[in-house]
Amino acid sequence: MPVALAPDGCRIAYQVGGAGPPLLLLAGQAGSHRWWTGVRADFEAYRTTVTLDWRGTGDSDKPDAPFSTIGFAEDAVAVLDALGIERADVYGTSMGGRVAQWVAARHPDRVRRLVLGCTTPGGAHGVERSAEVRRSLATPDAERNRRALLELMYTPDWIATHPGPYWTLGDPDMPPHARRRHLRASAEHDSWDALVDITAPTLVLHGDQDVFNPVANAHLLVERIPDARLVLLPGARHAYFEECRETAGRLVREFLT
């Protein structure tokens, strides 16, 4: 597995597939590159896809040290550097969307077009999930917690016809300290002041039934980022990119090409 060296020396594993102009795909919290397994082939029909295992996941190093979405963004840029990619399209979902915001704001010359999915600006301006949702995820019963997260990701009809594996639930081999570090990094994200510095044309996608990351955050991003537009996917929850694969994939392809 090829690795890139992050600014602090952490080894970041990455994966490349497909052919065409580069598309950097950024996974959600606690997700490795497998987050994209269900839809990656759709992008590889017209793009060279680049994914990475966030530090703490997959084949990347797993240091027990503070993580941040800014730090994850620098890890992603290190992967582009290792591949000699000067400029790429960037598509991040959930926490990966948080990270993508920093990549685009801090490295505008590296991002041609930006897609932000089911994500938030965080901080004081971001809209938090409800107390009911937080309670459903706070149960100490691992199976109940898994089921609650699964139902936040997908509709019951989709779950009934798709038995898994569900990579959007996270990397099952993550050590506990890395899960905690990911959770904190995502929770501490606050890009509000930096969003106005994004110069790449931006598409914001969000399921209109997403309560894991409330849809109000999508409206905030579009209002704050110059040259951004919003598309809501009817009936979709957090993992819209899988459940609404055909529609979401078409929207991304049209936007990028």
Image (spheres, rainbow, N blue to C red):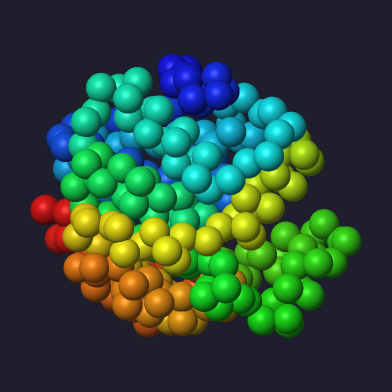
Image: 74 above or below 161: above
Q: Residue at x 88, y 61 (%)?
A: 140
Foreground residue, 212 or 104?
Answer: 104
Q: Residue at x 53, y 73 (%)?
A: 126
Q: Residue furthest right?
A: 140
Q: Residue furthest front?
A: 193
Q: Quadrant of residue 11?
A: top right
Q: Position of residue 122 (x, y in %)?
A: 53, 66
Q: Residue at x 40, y 28 (%)?
A: 78
Q: Residue at x 19, y 60 (%)?
A: 201
Q: Quadrant of residue 173?
A: top right
**Left or right relative to 192: residue 139:** right
Foreground residue, 76 or 145?
Answer: 76
Q: Is there any visible trace of residue 249 in the rendered image?
A: no
**Left or right relative to 191: residue 146:** right
**Left or right relative to 251: residue 125:** right
Q: Is there any visible trace of residue 83 in the rendered image?
A: yes
Q: Position of residue 27 (x, y in %)?
A: 48, 47
Q: Position of residue 157 (x, y in %)?
A: 53, 75
Q: Position of residue 43 (x, y in %)?
A: 26, 46
How many dots with numbers?
0
